[in-house]
């Protein structure tokens, strides 16, 4: 198979199953490497703000720092991937940049 065919096959597999991905990311604030988690489930992509307990536990057990952050636009808090070096958190709109990045993948039920 060519690289392109492998990519296509991987994409089809993503669409058919639920996967937790843990990818390496460069912190936007301090530039250090951090781990971030995302879930790609049946075509839907989301970050820790929508993880269930099982997904949170899995991500945390793999070394991802997920902390509750204040949302500037409301009084509520939400969970976000957080840089262990400086405490900056990754906004959910940046999650998309890391889909299919280099990292670990775990199948979800
Ligand atoms: Zn940082």
Image (tube, grey):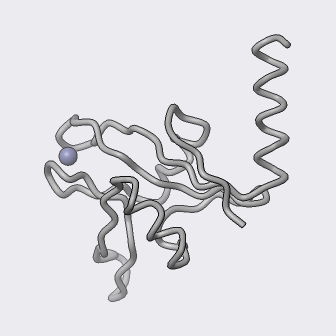
Residue 57 location, x and y as percent?
A: 44, 70
Question: Is residue 68 depicted above or below 2 in this figure?
Answer: below
Residue drawn at (75%, 14%), measured in percent from left and top?
A: 3
Question: Is 26 displayed left or right of 84 in the figure?
Answer: right
- The extreme left residue here reads 86
Question: Is 6 displayed left or right of 24 in the figure?
Answer: right
**Which residue is at the front of the view, 109 or 36?**
109
**Which residue is at the front of the view, 73 or 47?**
47
Question: Is residue 35 depicted above or below 61 in this figure?
Answer: above
**Which residue is at the front of the view, 103 or 79?**
103
Q: In which quadrant will I find the C terminus?
A: bottom right
Question: Is 89 displayed left or right of 59 in the figure?
Answer: left
Residue 12 location, x and y as percent?
A: 85, 41
Question: Is residue 80 depicted above or below 72 in this figure?
Answer: above
Residue drawn at (58%, 62%), measured in percent from left and top?
A: 46
Residue 20 location, x and y as percent?
A: 59, 55
Question: Is 2 displayed left or right of 106 in the figure?
Answer: right
- The extreme front residue here reads 61
- The extreme top residue here reads 2
Residue drawn at (53%, 55%), measured in percent from left and top?
A: 38
Residue drawn at (34%, 76%), measured in percent from left and top?
A: 71
Rendering quarter of residue 81:
bottom left
Count of marks placed on residues: 0
Residue 65 location, x and y as percent?
A: 30, 59
Q: In which quadrant will I find the N terminus?
A: top right
């Amino acid at each position: 198979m060519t690289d392109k065919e492998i990519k296509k096959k991987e994409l089809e597999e993503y669409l058919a199953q639920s996967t937790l991905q843990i990818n390496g990311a460069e912190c936007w604030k301090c530039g250090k490497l951090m781990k971030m988690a995302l879930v790609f489930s049946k075509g839907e992509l989301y970050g820790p703000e929508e993880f269930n307990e099982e997904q949170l536990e899995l991500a945390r057990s793999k070394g991802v720092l997920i902390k509750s952050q204040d949302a500037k636009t409301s009084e509520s808090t939400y969970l976000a991937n957080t840089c262990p070096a400086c405490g900056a958190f990754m906004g959910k709109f940046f999650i998309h940049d890391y889909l299919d990045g280099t990292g670990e993948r775990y199948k979800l039920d």
